Image (spheres, rainbow, N blue to C red):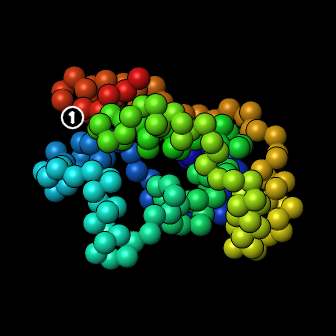
Amino acid sequence: MRDVIRKHCKKNIKNYTFTNGFKHKFWIPRVLGVRTVTPLNLCKHSKRQMVKTLSEEYGYKEYGQKHFEDLLTKFLEGVWLPKRFGHDMRRPQLSSLVITGQMKRDDALKILENPPIKEEECQELFAEVARKLNISKEELLGYFEMEECTEKFRNISKIYELGIRVYELIGLEKRIRR
């Protein structure tokens, strides 16, 4: 991100806070001594049970998919990422439910057979997001259809991969990675 900013930004962004795995996995917990408390990990719960409780006690209505309560996130996860880049955010979300035994794999695969958003809703979202960004729908569509960037930027993915391996060896990283 720093390389993209260095090459393409004309404005100074000195107030932007950059973060990284070293800071969150090592510096904050080990040096500063800040502990993360995860109370939901201490009790049995499931998505279905939580949605039922929220619906009965607070009148909660499901949005159809995780994070679809927000217009921009719904647009990014339901339209932009799957159609422009072929990345369906439902895959990791459903995978978590399968791994924790809250859903069968076949049910998750059936959900993935359908697009995250119907085409007519996709068009409405395009118009609404363009309006919120104060640009025309055609301009937003132009960004959507523009050629993918092939410019190479410096990245530090090798450092991150090494850091993950070190964290796994010393027991700081417990997630399963493939």
Q: How many marks?
A: 1
- Compared across the picture, whether 126 is left or right of 15 comes to right
- Compared across the picture, whether 166 is left or right of 82 comes to left
Quadrant of the rendering where the C terminus is positioned:
top left
Q: Position of residue 2 (x, y in %)?
A: 56, 47
Residue located at (12% from left, 51% from top): 42
Q: From this viewpoint, is residue 12 visible?
A: no
Q: Position of residue 64 (x, y in %)?
A: 51, 58
Indicate the quadrant where residue 21 lies: top left
Q: Which residue is mark 1?
A: 172
Tell which of 48 and 152 is nearer to you: 48
- Compared across the picture, whether 167 is left or right of 85 comes to left
Q: Is residue 25 above or below residue 46?
A: above
Q: Residues within 10 Å of mark 1 (few under 14, many from 20)?
A: few
Q: Is residue 42 above or below residue 163?
A: below
Tell which of 156 and 77 is nearer to you: 77
- Compared across the picture, whether 70 is left or right of 149 comes to left
Tell which of 135 and 67 is nearer to you: 67
Residue located at (29% from left, 47% from top): 24
Residue located at (24% from left, 42% from top): 26
Q: Secondary structure at mark 1?
A: loop
Residue located at (44% from left, 41% from top): 94
Indicate the quadrant where residue 49 lies: bottom left
